[in-house]
Image: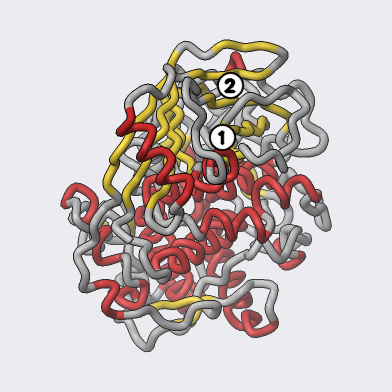
Amino acid sequence: MSNDPSRRDFLITLGSATALGLISPPLAQAFDGTAPLPGAIRTRRNVADSTAAKDLASLRRGVAEMKKLIASRPTDPRGWVLQSYIHGNCGGFTKCQHGNWFFAPWHRVYIYYFEQLIQYFSADKDFALPYWNWTETHVVPDSFYGDGNALNDTVSISGSCRGAPSAGRGRAQGSAFSEDDLKNYVGPVKIGSIQSNPDFASYGGANPGRGALEATPHNFVHRWVGGTKGSNMVQYFSPLDPIFWMHHCNIDRLYSDWLSRPGHKPPSDQSAWRDASFNDFFDPAGRPAGKEWTCGITVDSEAMGYVYDTLKSFPKAMFERVAQAPRVVSTVAASGGTVRDRVLSFRSAVIAQPESKSMLEAAAAAPRHYAVRLTLLDVKTPSNQDTGIHVFLGEVDADTPLTAPGYVGSFTYFDGEGGDAKDAHHGRHGVVILDASEAFQNLYGAGGIPDGRALTVSLRTEALYEGVESPASVEEVQPSSVRIEVLDLGG
């Protein structure tokens, strides 16, 4: 089908929560206005906190107006459906950046312009986008449910998109994460570990490759909210569900937190990242926008006019330094994994070179100066993406707990599903990069790597959350090879 917007493409259905009609008269008179100039620094707040009540009210008004545009001005790029189509449509992902090092900065600019649209359509120039801190609030906030509530998931494009879901979230009001969900994907211990990793590639992504911020909490929350219903939140067009924006605002908050930590350096020394920008968005006047926000500039959220209530300011020297990427000083690779008892294992050649063995043992013994990066290459996307993949160093079996010393981390998928797409825009195979420093230290920090020892990487799969039947097997996700790299952090 054509991806060009037309009235035919907006044969949508709306739940009873959204009344169709013309845009409110005061806003109609201002349609040709210009984008608001940045004012004082805005503070983005936790949507569950009473201090966010004013912003939440403005968000509700602004979303309601943008949903009205679906019928009154279906080709207006500020309307609810076309804002979603920036991310993805029935044909797959469109402009969004996933599976690479642009994931965090691209989405930062996406929600920045959404925030401006809400300022405009709610007539609240001081509006700051709230965030959903799922590490603390283990349910979709109640403020995103209810008949007549614009923040509910009320829009379906099933009329023009074969296989698209009906309106309605995949999680009923009050549904909460399980203890396993928190432990493996979004809880404070898991997020604390991800945030403490100083290597940008295994945190925010590489070129190519998805880091843990995307592969673990980001992907999990999308899939969990979508539920077994497969609602909008797990589709290419996931921004149709208003909770998308609060979820990504929290991802952006974590990115800000990561950037503020000493020794955490984005790839600003690489012009391919630093100077890249994306003119994929629209300002409040409906004009194309975004090219002025290079990845290097967006490192400083204050330059974009906002901070988070959990992190009020940044060390300004951070934006003036020349970031030095971690230097790879040793690499061990393995391919041709074998499956036994539902566990996929890759075994390297014996570590025979004294230099390699020395660097590996240094990484295990000196975590302040070295990190260990684990890269899974050519990871396949299974038909059932509601699957968790658990990664270990060393030999494990199907029942090895995630408390084992060699446990590296867990990840899942957000490759879109449903609609008319035969394949994801970003490919059905991918690169996943995880920080294996702690697991490596646990295994080899005391006695070192025994002579004649090879290194082993093991994977197993299980249902992503309660209620999932028939999760993918390791054969369905099997990477073609794995790579273990020792990084000199220059500490």
Which residue shows up at 76% across the image and 47% down it?
171
Residue shown at 44% from the left, 77% from the top: 307
In the image, which disc is placed on residue 413? 1
Mark number, residue 305: none
Q: Quadrant of the C terminus?
A: bottom left
| Mark 1 or 2, nearer chain start | 2
Amino acid type at image mark 1:
Tyr
> Considering depth in this image, is 80 or 41 the residue closer to the camera?
41
Looking at the picture, tell me which residue is in the foreground, 156 or 11. 156
Cα distance, mark 1 to mark 2?
A: 9 Å
Classify residue 116 as left or right of residue 32.
Answer: right
- The image shows residue 15 at horizontal and vertical percentages of 70, 50
Q: Secondary structure at mark 1?
A: loop
Q: Where, quadrant-wise, is the N terminus in this rendering? A: top left
Q: Is residue 78 visible?
A: no
Residue 419 in the image, given as x and y percentages of width and height = 55, 28
Image quadrant assignment for residue 484: top left
- Residue designated by label 2: 382
